[in-house]
Image: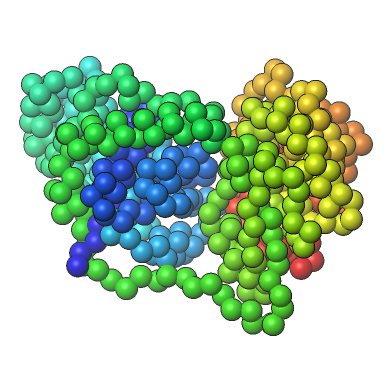
Amino acid sequence: MRKSKFLIAATSSGCGKTTLSLGLMRALTRRHIHVQPFKCGPDYIDTQFHAIAAGTPSINLDLFMASESHVRSLFSDYDAEVKIVEGVMGMFDGYSRMKGSSADVAMTLDIPVVLLVNAASTAYSVAATVFGFRNFMPEVKIAGVIFNRVASESHFAFLKEACADAGVECLGYIKRNERLAMPSRHLGLSLAAREEMERYISEAAEAVEEGVDTDRLLELTSCAKTPENIQKPAAFPTGREPLKIAVARDEAFNFIYSANIRSLKNHPRYAAEIDYFSPLHDTSIRADTDLVYLPGGYPELFAAELEANESMRNSIREFAACGGRIIGECGGMIYLGEETDGKKMCGVLPIKSTMKEARLRLGYRSVEIDGMKFRGHEFHYSRTEDDAKATKADAVQTDIRGKAVSTPVYRQGNVVAGYTHLYWAEADILKLFNL
């Protein structure tokens, strides 16, 4: 049996990588093909869309937050008939020149690229674009090209000729379709948001089925089946009972790196048991919880509902007051504060947050907290205020150029919280709590 694996890259951001990726995932899944999705970079929203399209969790592959060996191991650890990696930005756009780019990930994994080109308002001129992408770095193996936003069959005929003259096989097209405009990514996982994403994914799949030669794509990106390096759950080498870790996951909290959770399940000392819970819908965390993880998400969209669930807020506050260990990231940190835009939160940390005068803070971060080094990603519009009484951790954060950033990390007893989404799949996060 042969398997297929490839990365979907584009000439620039906005070409429709996510539309093509989701459409392919769903179209192949409809054929009862097991698809494993991956995402280049730190994005924790597209991975949720992948999971809806393919029916299996999507895995981040990030060459800033993780080592090359870790990224290769993650990619090989997941078995599937087809592995699809959605790229990031333009094919050669990285955090430093092409470092961490789609091309860099493709070369690291030794997989071919399917190049997506936005064909709106152009025709034969795309020959120069395709030729340039093919020859700029020949080490990147371009298996074929797919065109997006194609106006008609005659338009596609010009594009196919351009592809042939550039020396790259054309694998098809996606028609111009206003209904394939990407839904808002700021929706949470509410029922309405899921319904809209399902509509979008279904239409993307139909567009792929109509215009893309998926059989030829799989043929060009196939390889002989090789044994997969599937990581098994670790045994308890010390005989210790597993840690019980409560992870918030619902419409309000869902920015989670799958590899982080897997590293807790496979922890060499504790092999944690993960209990997902909902700050929106559940009344309390379990009494035997050892650690609570509150990831990022959309608490600002659900602030009224979070305030109304007083029982859960009290449960979190009492857990912290009794020395309970808590990690709060971005939205999770906001939830641990006293209030956000006037809505009561848990009151664990003496901070307030607001979306007023919102300004995007975005970028990779190197983080050192109490002597432990992590890497992560900061992405938020809100800001904290009235945090003078909050205790800051012994922490330093820098951007990709090594310049210090002012984003705070709070530490109050066994509660650690900040805006940065940490990637700890290669670091022992439990050592922050002397475990």
Q: Depth check: 162 or 229 in front?
A: 229
Residue 196 at x, y percent in the picture = 43, 28
The percent position of residue 183, horizontal first and vertical second, equals 43, 26
Tell me the residue at 36%/58% (across/down): 109
Question: Would residue 134 appear left or right of 107 to someone viewing this image?
Answer: left
The C terminus, quarter of image: bottom right
Residue 94: quadrant of the picture: top left
Q: Which image quarter holds the N terminus?
A: bottom left
Q: Describe residue 380's horizontal placement relative to residue 180 as left or right.
A: right
Res 270 visible: yes
Q: Quadrant of residue 83?
A: bottom left
Residue drawn at x 31%, y 43% is: 26
Question: For the image shown, how many numbered marks are present on the structure?
Answer: 0
Q: Residue at x 60, y 53 (%)?
A: 423
Q: Could you tell me residue 67's position as x and y percent? A: 51, 59
Image color mode: rainbow
- 426 lies above or below 114: below
Occupied quadrant, residue 180: top left
Q: Residue furthest right?
A: 389
The picture places residue 417, in percent across and down from the top left corner, at: 75, 45
Regarding residue 168, the answer to whether it shows in the image is: no
Residue at image coords 46%, 44%: 47
